[in-house]
Image: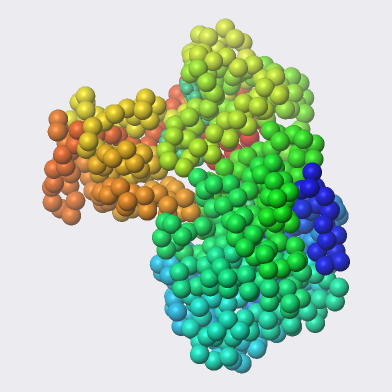
Amino acid sequence: MKLLTPIKIGNLEIRNRVVMPSMTNNYTKDGYVTQQMLDYYEARARGGVGMICVEDGIVDFPVGNNTKNPVSIDNNKYIPMLTKLSTVIKKHGARAAIQISHAGRRAGRVSHENGCMEVTRGMMPVAPSIVGHPFPGHVVPQELRIEEIEGIVEKFGQATRRALEAGFEVVGLHCAHMYLCGEFLSPWANKRTDKYGGNLENRLRFVLEIIERMKKELVNVPLICRMNGQEPEGGNTLLEIREIARRLQLAGVEAISVSTGFGAVLNERDFISAEAPIGTPEGCIVHLAENIKIGITIPVMTGNMIRNPEFAENVLLENRADMITLGRPLITDPDWVNKVRAGKYRDIRPCVSCCQGCVGYLTKDLPITCIMNPVAGKEGDLSMQPVPADREKKVLVIGGGPGGLETAITAASRGHKVTIWEKEQQLGGTLLLAELPPRKDELKKIRDYFSHTVSQLKIEVELGKEANKELIKAFKPDAVVLAIGGQSIIPLIKGIAQNNVFLANDVLRNNMTLGEKVVIIGGGQVGVELAELLGEKGVSVTVVEALPSVAGDMSSAVKVLLMFKLEDYNVRMLTNTLAKEIKANGVLIERNDAEEFIEADSIVIAVGSAAQNSLEVELKEFVQEVYAVGDCLKPGNILGAVHDGYKVGLII
Ligand SMILES: Cc1cc2nc3c(=O)[nH]c(=O)nc-3n(C[C@H](O)[C@H](O)[C@H](O)COP(=O)(O)OP(=O)(O)OC[C@H]3O[C@@H](n4cnc5c(N)ncnc54)[C@H](O)[C@@H]3O)c2cc1C
Ligand SMILES: Cc1cc2nc3c(=O)[nH]c(=O)nc-3n(C[C@H](O)[C@H](O)[C@H](O)COP(=O)(O)O)c2cc1C
Ligand code: SF4
């Protein structure tokens, strides 16, 4: 497989063509690499990846920072821990690279959940020009003065020196995503009229000066550069982007990693974010790498939404790029490369591009995790490692949703004899509904993975079997795991018991036709996704939500496209609104202290679900070990169910 063949960047040989690109993880403390971070990266290096590029080393903290816990590289005091980091990566044969960066005007975002300019410790962000980042809430930056620019160039030089002292074998310059370097390059953000602005030659000057300074440190050590393959309207054209890449090569850059995204979503069509969300086609930016590759001879890396080994292989075979960056899939499965090498593609835990545990947690200032990998970020935590069971137990898992399935495979992999009872005719639980709204087909990969693993581990599955106390008693299990999911909540609204009222889950499950006008009560993920599904079919939809905003339970990376669609379908979103009474021909609502009647053929209830684990107490009378996982314990999401299931699977 070409994917697994070595390649050279400069004079440095990389054992294969899979690169883990920079991904900020919030595992550091006060800028220092932590043990948690060492364990996380070591697991990926052990998993066979060719090169790991550690994320965003901030060259100028705090003003150049835009995350809660960045890796800092602006002071020699960070070198010892950085050295440990490069060492654990190299120990397993992967090449250790580090990206260095300055966030420019993307620092100091006020839209951040934790408030104004916290990440820059109250300092004003800096940028080429006084042009605010278009993402709502970003503060307008200060324009850098010439002497300040010179100072920043030197900081990149010093950071490079530290990277080398810390044993990194490759240094990456972050020119993508409209951070400071990207801002200087782009007329979208750079409005200067001095030697750093105006024509492309001038816009390149800042980056070329940094490269020249970095090169003074980088004797025989490759420099790679990450750049955007496309820019928003008013930014560089594809031809200019190709020219930038050519100039970077001329300046001594030895490989280019092509990315996209600029931290804002301006419109539905032009937008491919740095982390393409679920529903984006595989290899969505390979064409941008191809555009860049035309003008240069150094290796070009492409990624973003490359998931399947066969797809990655074809990109290389067709010479569309030379290396593949694999980001989120390596959060989900650190052993991706080793599994590919062993031909065990179906054993790979799938990343479904949901952006929930990774980017979603990052934007909430939390350490990243993954819905499908409960061990992500906990690789060194011994309590999270499966150990063979002392004795084989007869384990009954009730419910074949993600919670039950994860429990079953974890317990079975430790040597227990596991049986799953599922009352429906197929496994998957609520996942079967979750994958129905537009763009969510990718969730099917979760079911595929579980089904495959369940059969590999010879777990007995009884479909169409609804558990009750008597059946469980007769089965004589040593341990029972309740994973029966939540129960849809029926709110106390006058008139709700009418035959024009339906539960969202039933509408999805039975693909119901609801008429021309529909009111959905509840604007959480289920409500708004159903609104889109109905809107797509031409139904006139109104969403009634009591809270001040809709879809608060969704990752913003995924929500953003959905909101564009709801706008396209003229879905009426009524927040801070109460449904007061349901009538035969619609719903009476109250908002802004006034009542309004909304006509509707059908009313759909989507106000969430409640726990249903009362059986737990009853079962304890005759079963030694009883557990509950997932929505039946605490309604939530796939992450909650899978993580619960894993933890219970470990302790049975
Ligand atoms: C439309 C929709 C979209 C969603 N989108 C997302 C999303 O994008 N991301 C996300 O993280 N979450 C999403 N969710 C939520 C997610 O699907 C659930 O949180 C998750 O499936 C819960 O897993 P679970 O295993 O706890 O329960 P479930 O998936 O509900 O599985 C419970 C299983 O138990 C079975 N069962 C019940 N009683 C018995 C019994 N007595 N005997 C045998 N079997 C029984 C049920 O048939 C079912 O198969 C969505 C939900 C919906 C409805
Ligand atoms: C949690 C997270 C943090 C990221 N942080 C960075 C970063 O610090 N620097 C960077 O260049 N890209 C960053 N990215 C973008 C990734 O490097 C990668 O380009 C992106 O995830 C798309 O590739 P994928 O589909 O393989 O994940 C980040 C992505 C994620 C998911
Ligand atoms: S949380 Fe979702 S997008 Fe992020 S790595 Fe896991 S599966 Fe992929």
Image quarter of residue 651: top right
Asked if residue 397 can be seen in this view, the reply is yes
Asked if residue 58 can be seen in this view, the reply is no
Point 19% across, 51% down: residue:
591
Q: Is residue 602 left or right of residue 436?
A: left
**Type of colouring:** rainbow
392 or 371: which is nearer to us?
371
Q: Is residue 499 above or below residue 206?
A: above
Q: Position of residue 94 (x, y in %)?
A: 82, 55
Q: Is residue 92 above or below residue 637?
A: below
Point 22% across, 36% down: residue:
516
Q: Position of residue 119 (x, y in %)?
A: 54, 70
Point 62% across, 70% down: residue:
242
Q: Position of residue 144 (x, y in %)?
A: 55, 86
Q: How many marks?
A: 0
Point 68% across, 68% down: residue:
295
Q: Is residue 625 above or below residue 26?
A: above
Q: Quadrant of the C terminus?
A: top right
Q: Quadrant of the N terminus?
A: top right
Q: Position of residue 171 (x, y in %)?
A: 75, 69
Image quarter of residue 492: top left
Q: Is residue 354 left or right of residue 339?
A: left
180 or 478: which is nearer to us?
180
450 or 124: which is nearer to us?
450
